[in-house]
Amino acid sequence: MKPKLEVEIGNLRLKNPVMTASGTFGYGREYEDFVDLQGLGAIIVKGISLEPRPGNPPPRIVETSCGMLNAIGLENVGLKRFVEEKMVVLRRYRTSVIVNILGDTIEDYCHLCEQLSDVDGVSAIEVNISCPNVKKGGVAFGTDAKMVNEVTGAVREKTDLPLIIKLSPNVTDITLMARAAEEGGADAVSLINTLLGLAIDVKTRKPKLANVVGGLSGPAIKPVALRMVWQTANAVSVPVIGIGGIGSTRDAIEFLLAGASAIQIGTANFINPAVTGEIVAGIHDYLRDNDIKSVSELVGAVILPEG
Amino acid sequence: MKPKLEVEIGNLRLKNPVMTASGTFGYGREYEDFVDLQGLGAIIVKGISLEPRPGNPPPRIVETSCGMLNAIGLENVGLKRFVEEKMVVLRRYRTSVIVNILGDTIEDYCHLCEQLSDVDGVSAIEVNISCPNVKKGGVAFGTDAKMVNEVTGAVREKTDLPLIIKLSPNVTDITLMARAAEEGGADAVSLINTLLGLAIDVKTRKPKLANVVGGLSGPAIKPVALRMVWQTANAVSVPVIGIGGIGSTRDAIEFLLAGASAIQIGTANFINPAVTGEIVAGIHDYLRDNDIKSVSELVGAVILPEG
Amino acid sequence: MNQFLTKAQIIENVEVGPKILRLTFEAEEIAEIAKSGQFVMLKTATESSDDPILRRPFSIHRVDGKRVSILYKVVGRGTTILAKQQDEIDLVGPLGNGFFFPAEGSLAIVGGGLGIAPLLFVAQQALRQGYKEKDIQILLGARTSAEFPVVDDFRQMGLKIRTATDDGSAGHHGLVTELMDMKGNWTVLTCGPAPMMRAVAKKCEEKNWECQVSLESTMACGMGACLGCAVQGNVKHEYKHVCKDGPVFQASDVCL
Amino acid sequence: MNQFLTKAQIIENVEVGPKILRLTFEAEEIAEIAKSGQFVMLKTATESSDDPILRRPFSIHRVDGKRVSILYKVVGRGTTILAKQQDEIDLVGPLGNGFFFPAEGSLAIVGGGLGIAPLLFVAQQALRQGYKEKDIQILLGARTSAEFPVVDDFRQMGLKIRTATDDGSAGHHGLVTELMDMKGNWTVLTCGPAPMMRAVAKKCEEKNWECQVSLESTMACGMGACLGCAVQGNVKHEYKHVCKDGPVFQASDVCL
Ligand SMILES: Cc1cc2nc3c(=O)[nH]c(=O)nc-3n(C[C@H](O)[C@H](O)[C@H](O)COP(=O)(O)OP(=O)(O)OC[C@H]3O[C@@H](n4cnc5c(N)ncnc54)[C@H](O)[C@@H]3O)c2cc1C
Ligand SMILES: Cc1cc2nc3c(=O)[nH]c(=O)nc-3n(C[C@H](O)[C@H](O)[C@H](O)COP(=O)(O)OP(=O)(O)OC[C@H]3O[C@@H](n4cnc5c(N)ncnc54)[C@H](O)[C@@H]3O)c2cc1C
Ligand SMILES: Cc1cc2nc3c(=O)[nH]c(=O)nc-3n(C[C@H](O)[C@H](O)[C@H](O)COP(=O)(O)O)c2cc1C
Ligand SMILES: Cc1cc2nc3c(=O)[nH]c(=O)nc-3n(C[C@H](O)[C@H](O)[C@H](O)COP(=O)(O)O)c2cc1C
Ligand code: FES
Ligand code: FES
């Protein structure tokens, strides 16, 4: 009997729990030659803003031990071109498309949600709240529970699409942020975004990134991400989407066991452009070999020691 | 001309900026076959509590990508045996000995400071505030600025020894914790302690650590540690001691450039038991080759882009 | 399909100069469609190790039948490990746009240091596309004679070569740009250190020759997904992506 | 000095059984002072890679002149990389306490599966210390005959060997403990899977023979600094550290 891979994130049904992490899979097309895009649970596209953004000056990326720092600066084509060009291509793949959005103000987020709600082929919206709130002196929306609640509540009113709030890990207690999002009306939370990091070139004495600091991703952050996913899954009742250093079927299963209803694959796409498809197949085989009927049976199934 | 390696942490003079991170170098003796202990800036010993602690059940450690998780559970011989046995040996090495302390309550920390102040050969005290405060429902002292300030102020009254507060990285804004320690009377802050992480065995479905979660250390965390050290050095006027993933001379120089007045080497001791001595020599050679007169010229000398 | 992910059999991985190696592997699909100026991304981490994590980009140096070669210098972590590989190599390619050959006219191929790497394949392809030897001029610059690892390979193709070295140990004592004194109209294809390419582009502007430059930048994905490989375009705050818009650009389109 | 950090020349690293290899390297200082039951920690990450980060512990399998060997099974990341090493190996050792030989009496060396690894060195050392062949009894258990890689090495030493396999494909069809039927007073030195050692210890208790067990535990430092290698002692909440208090323990001192 074929195991069931379908998962539900709120009222969003996915073929399987494997999605692509925003900013690491372009707008899908880039990976056509390596992955059967139609076989993915969902494609989450590079973060979109109201207006196009040029991004940061180079260097934008630097390798670290088992990870990388990036300071792309949220370069993107902007809402208009995304809808007119990218979505046209994305619709062809007959795969759920989740649009990741970013803004400087709550109003930005609201406009984006409003306008994306009417776009054919958009299955859900993921809100990147790791961006600085320009009206609040640039503190990231995602590091203050009150702001998380406000943003979520505001965008919730603007769209009926499934709403995923993407949480920042650079906080003392991520469960407070998750609850704030849940209370604000989020259908799900996804975590983690990158950890803030720095690297310095000892020859030039300059930071290795033009932007000085950048976001750490890759296998290096997996243990931190898994811990936060586990804590969050135990703190909220909405589905949790696990992200952070996932590069193999085993990694994916770890996140499911920790309580993630689905997972996203980011940096691993750069190491192995076929990895997303391989993990979809790997999860299928794992379920079959351990005769587990549905992937949902794995979610949160970690066995904790007594007492 | 021989470059000057001496550094000052408050009124504590060290031969050089290289110290051993608590819990990774035992009580010094363990490494005598590999390192000229007398040549180190300081030996920071395994965290000491008032009473001996057995520590956590095994497994206590698990390897992760470019890092490791540990949940030793603060096993230690307790103050009495430390003073009567370990200090006797440590005094022989004619190296600064810094005692790392831990407690369940502010009172514990105070007693430890009081009693260590009279112990011959103790050069300074490093306070590990990443421990849970049992009277405050187990939240770590180090994750709340008010508690950080209280602990620091309380221990400050009990000792005239140089006081180093060791900060936890599991916070939204580590500079707030550093300021709270500074205002409390700390002579220096050291950071980072480990990042909280989790790993799950997909075969058994159990956490790989008996304690479920553990502390992440090693090269994997270096970018996060370096960023926090840089932020903190710009936020406080007391010396900052850099810790986190340092395994080479280049790593050490990065931390100095970011603003650390001295550094600690932890997990790298497990990979290369001779690493501390090699980095002392490496810093000397780097200064000589770039004819820099004193290591202090490197501290905070990172060159940031204009604007 | 125009990009492939494969584990290719290594034919040879040998030193051909100071810390300079040529790696040749069998990769038929890539050999069939590769254009000169395109590159491949190699995984350098050994199996069951996650570090170094990122693939490393290398220009296609030559294509002979099913065989593809790269020419690389050992400069750091990845290339150190790469220099030890002998059985198989995990790679993605061909990536990037490649050089554009004009319908007719003459080609000046100008290389500096290891910039020579993609240029041998440029010469191979030009000849295969019917360019006459006389219509191709090779100009190579280096710090010293030791740094001309594969010059003979050009000679064996029967091409005119002129070299320049900073120390005069081989060919003209001076800069390679000083050799760009040909008459007539040339399309210049160049690869090398930034200052050298800047000089070449300037010379072309004076002579009003088309100039194509092959750029480098740190890369993560190599296929236009991460936006990490940005370089400054010719207007402020406008960036090009080396892996997708390039690595070959019209000199006038980028800020060298 | 009684512990060394060295890069040792690899003499051989060959397969001697299913996924079982013997690695022999030259390490004079270690060879001179090593005691049977002690172990070494090998770095498996390749140069200029940070992963896998931790060293891996392996028992000393045999010592011949300046040469030291380990016998290991490929089970994961580190051993997969180790199996490819051919030139040199970065190691620390000798570490741990080692087996204690009684002043007189007879030695029963009882191994299960790859627990055989440290026991060959035990036999070597017993003979070198003047034990007579007749006073040494080797008892080896395995799942099947294929898993007796180095039994002949024991035979070549002129030692009495009795084997047992779960599937009866070699020697006694059953458990190795069923071979512990010797008369008289024996000191039992054992290494193998936990259940097997538990059974051996129980048998010894019945016969009231001394029983020394060699334990495993995940390790970081291997020298008593990290306190990571704890195992449960014989009283609750009392832990022993395998790398320093062990790896050899009196069976009665630990909770098997
Ligand atoms: C499109 C493209 C084509 C290339 N073709 C070739 C080629 O044909 N032959 C060749 O030898 N190299 C080529 N390079 C450069 C090559 O990718 C780097 O030398 C290599 O990635 C270094 O890897 P490493 O791990 O050894 O060095 P690292 O450990 O990553 O870095 C060590 C040192 O090398 C420098 N370095 C790192 N990346 C680059 C880079 N992209 N360019 C220049 N220096 C770098 C770093 O600044 C550092 O100082 C190309 C680069 C690009 C982008
Ligand atoms: C004191 C001591 C002596 C040892 N002597 C030998 C020896 O002589 N020969 C030998 O083959 N092995 C020996 N081991 C076990 C050996 O250290 C492990 O098999 C090795 O570390 C696995 O490394 P890996 O990276 O290949 O596996 P990993 O990738 O680290 O793990 C892969 C699998 O191996 C298992 N594993 C990991 N560590 C151990 C361990 N310490 N014991 C058992 N299973 C483990 C894991 O649970 C996992 O399932 C010894 C261990 C200790 C503590
Ligand atoms: C190059 C790069 C670009 C990214 N861009 C975005 C983005 O635009 N929006 C967003 O929410 N997250 C972005 N991320 C974060 C990833 O989606 C993901 O949360 C993070 O990388 C952790 O997952 P990983 O370890 O699997 O990469 C980006 C990450 C990388 C490496
Ligand atoms: C096994 C182990 C035990 C540790 N024990 C302590 C401790 O007792 N007290 C303390 O303040 N920090 C302890 N630490 C944290 C280290 O001192 C250091 O802050 C951390 O490991 C980061 O540095 P690193 O990446 O160089 O290891 C321990 C770390 C490890 C790996
Ligand atoms: S390297 Fe990723 S876009 Fe160019
Ligand atoms: S492995 Fe570190 S104390 Fe045993």
Image: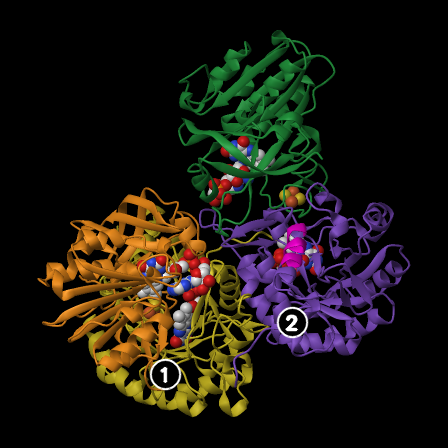
Chain colours: A purple, B yellow, C green, D orange
What chain does mark 1 sit on?
B
Tag nearer the camera, 1 or 2: 2
Label 1, secondary structure: give it.
loop
Up the image or down, D67 lies above or below A254; here it is above
Please tell me in which quarter of the rendered image ligand 6 is found.
Answer: bottom left
On the same chain, marks 1 and 2? The answer is: no
Residue to which mark 1 is pinned: B54
Is the magenta region chiefly helix, strand or loop? helix
Label 2, secondary structure: give it.
loop
State the image coordinates of residue B225 (x, y, percent, origin top left).
49, 64
Range of magenta residues: A277-285
Residue drawn at the location 77% of the way across and 79% of the way down: A183
- Judge by depth and name the residue closer to the eye, A85 or C44: C44
Residue drawn at the location 79% of the way across and 70% of the way down: A10
Residue to which mark 2 is pinned: A259
State the image coordinates of residue A264 (x, y, percent, origin top left).
67, 59
What chain does mark 2 sit on?
A
Up the image or down, A195 lies above or below B158; here it is above
